[in-house]
Image: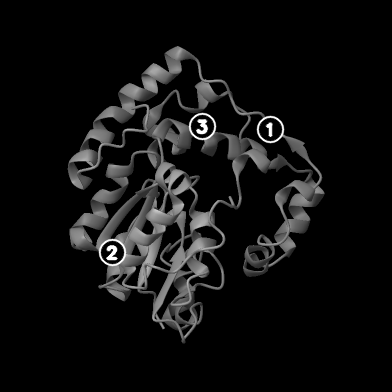
Amino acid sequence: MLPTFIVIGAMKCGTTSLYYYLAEHPEIGMSRRKETDFFLKEHGQWARGGDWYRQQFPEESSARGECSPNYTKRHLFDGVPERIASVCPDVRLIYLVRDPIERTVSHYQGSRQQGREDRAFEAAVAEPEQSNYVRTSRYHAQLQPYLDCFPRENLLVVTTEELGAAPAATLRAIYRFLGVNPSVRNQRTGTRFNPSAAKKKYSPWVRWLSHQVPQSLKDRLRLYLPLQWLPGKHVARPEVSPAVRARLEAIFRPDVAALRDLTGRDFGAWSV
């Protein structure tokens, strides 16, 4: 059973919350692990083959999906849209996006929490073409190869801001896009899963212990065990100086303009 839809990203835009919201709909079956990363040839599960991928989805659901934000990191993982099209040519794509500067800051904060980033924020975004944080926030650039592989009507762009401010209406739009009953009431809306503000920088032994737990089990436990109970130190959100913010606005402005042209949306809640 292959997916009928895929949430392709973006990282730090609420894909974990959307995964759990969609899983509550009686006609939707989400993958057993939130991020299968099947379509990543390297650092993913592509080598496991199609049979492994089919086993990730429940057979009884009319709509089936997964959420893998790595699918919109073309600067790190190439060929993803082409592989998706080769396996699921009619799949529908949901791209969850957020104010690009806010997403960049959250991505950086997450790397700090994971112990993967020691630089100051200004240094981490100083070279935009070399910055994973910046390039992941260029949404239109990330979408371009998908538009070469799929018809425009197979793509739905949703913002984190509208999912937070009007979750019921936003989910109804997503349900209609997926062809399931849009009138289903979701009891999980309003709950944020995997929020950056709740995360901490954990000690090496906690990180080691976390790696011993299968990801599918962690995805299930997240419904019942909040992140706050784990021991660790909170990592403060970095301060963004006016000069750095102005430079990021200039960097993102052309990409956001292209996304506006593509979607017909104004993204008025964004700072860019």
Q: Please state, as top left, top right, bottom left or bottom right, where the N terminus lies in the image.
A: bottom left
Residue 82 got which mark?
Answer: 2
The structure residue drawn at horizontal position 48% and vertical position 71%, both measured from the top left corner, is: 25
Residue 235 got which mark?
Answer: 1
SS state under label 2 = helix
Would residue 83 be seen by someone viewing this image from the given angle?
no
Q: How many marks?
A: 3
Of 236 and 135, the residue lying toward us? 236
Quadrant of the image occupied by residue 250: top left
Could you tell which of marks 1 and 3 lies nearer the N-terminus?
3
Residue at numbered disc 3:
105
What amino acid does circle 3 point to? Val
What amino acid does circle 1 point to? Val
Residue 195 on image: x %, y %: 60, 45
Could you tell which of marks 2 and 1 lies nearer the N-terminus?
2
Of 247 and 225, the residue lying toward us? 225
What amino acid does circle 2 point to? Glu
Direction top: furthest residue: 243
115 to the left or right of 99: right
Residue 62 on image: x %, y %: 39, 81
Query: Residue 272, relative to residue 182: is it above or below?
Result: above
SS state under label 3 = helix
Residue 72 on image: x %, y %: 38, 51
Could you give the CA–CA distance between mark 2 and mark 1, rounded to whole angstroms? 38 Å
